[in-house]
Image (cartoon, helix red, strand yellow):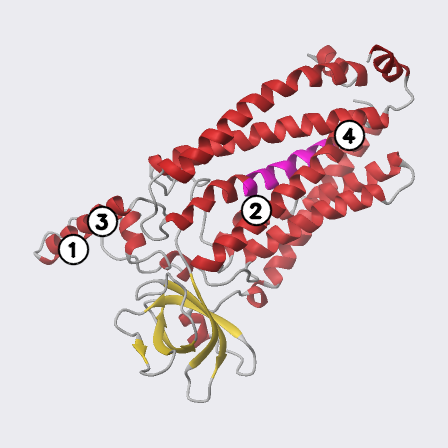
Amino acid sequence: MTPTRKRRLVMVTALVAGVGLATTLALRAFQENMLYFYSPTEFVELGVPEERTIRVGGLVADGSVRRMPGSMTIEFQVTDHAYAVPVSYTGVLPDLFREGQGVVARGRISDNGVFVAENLMAKHDENYMPPEVAQALHAGKMRAIERAQQGFPNEPEGNSGTTVADDSAAADGSAARGY
Amino acid sequence: MWLWFHKLGSPPYFYRTAGRLIPWFAIPAVLLLVAGTVGGLAIAPSDYEQGDGFRIIYVHVPSAYLAMFGYVAMAIAAAIGLIWRMKLAFAFAAACAPIGAAFTFLCLATGSLWGKPMWGVWWDWDGRMTSMLVLLFLYLGVIALRGAFDDAAKGDRAAALLAIVGVVNIPIIKFSVDWWNTLHQPATISKLSAPSMTMDMLGWLLIMIVGYMLFFAAVVTLRLRGEVLLRERGARWIRGLDSRA
């Protein structure tokens, strides 16, 4: 390799390394400001700006969905199994919305502590399978839970300590992942 | 090996070889794309959660993959061009850019169509979507920057620098779903554990991805021949082609 080419090779490598390092540092520095949504834990522990539109994401808590009669308003809790945030939303629900499903709500906190969503999005997980497979996995999980309750704890249960992003796959998803 | 490499770098030799290669890419590409489309849309089972709506994955995922693959290929060619001043490498980078931009656009468009019924929105500014949009702008920037110079050689070098700098966005796209809270779900196929997809769905997707790769190879070779003709215009071997035709 000629000296000129070697010099150019070093310069290109240095350019990639420099830009990579700068980007890494910038992304790390802005980590908190680049939050796409607050998990309920972050929502409660970090405290949220009251005058700003933010997003809250987590799972729709089981048994928490209440529909207001005569309106399109719905109230439910968004949970990450550590904390829960009460959310109220008026409008058309996404098809995948149901209890146990991951959701992201965009809106702002009201005076009485309820998060009023202008916009509600449903998350889905990265698992794809035919309905029969999902049913079989679900049935298998139910049997495992039964066995565990009868005193044969031979299969690990639950998925505590994971992040919200991972948790969004809970319910059906966790069965699919073979927890 | 080196002799072959140098021969390939010679425009007339490359032009002839590439012309012979195109059918070897194009015919399997068409066969695989037809098979993958029929398999993905008609034969694969519907999803337990998303029903038939998930089938857009058979266009969305290969497009996303090729968008990123095309960018890396373009940046590597750009680096080779900058370091060794190899004309064919610059021509390859120039040929890649519009194809990669088209795949990026296809990925964003199909993602948007998929997002509306499943998530409830056409678009939202999460890490994955935003970084993919940045990729589209990088492609367009590379194309525009090359075109902005009257001197083609200067345009090639400037565009190559931008292409190389933009590579930093590729790991951001890939890991955005792991680093940040996103609306987009994490990876299904490209992860260390087994893919989160049953084989009767995944098989057709892999066929589609290979089909897209071959399609990319065919189109990039076709465009590269055009680039070579354009860049070598006036050379004696091209006039030779003309008289034979």
Query: Of callouts 2 and 4, which one flags the residue occurring earlier in the amino acid sequence?
Result: 4
Asked where in the image residue B145 lies, by quadrant, the reply is: top right
Q: CA distance from mark 4 to mark 1?
A: 61 Å
Q: Amino acid at mark 1?
A: Ile
Q: Secondary structure at mark 1?
A: helix
User: Quick check: B225 left or right of A61?
Assistant: right
Q: Does residue B66 show up magenta in the picture?
A: yes
Q: Which mark is residue B187?
A: none
Respond whether the residues carrying marks 3 and 4 are from the same subunit.
Answer: no
Q: Secondary structure at mark 3?
A: helix
Q: Amino acid at mark 2?
A: Cys
Q: Secondary structure at mark 2?
A: helix
Query: Of callouts 1 and 3, which one flags the residue occurring earlier in the amino acid sequence?
Result: 3
Residue extending furthest toward the front: B245
Q: Secondary structure at mark 4?
A: helix
Camera sees residue B78? no
Where in the figure is residue A152, as x and y percent of width and height? 10, 52
**Residues drawn in magenta:** B63-78
In the foreground, A120 or A72: A72
Relative to A63, is B63 above or below? above
Q: Amino acid at mark 4?
A: Ala
The residue tagged 2 is B107
The residue tagged 4 is B91
Residue under mark 1: which chain is it in? A
Residue under mark 2: which chain is it in? B
Asked where in the image residue A146 lies, by quadrant, the reply is: bottom left
Where in the figure is residue B206, as x and y percent of width and height? 45, 33
The residue tagged 1 is A145
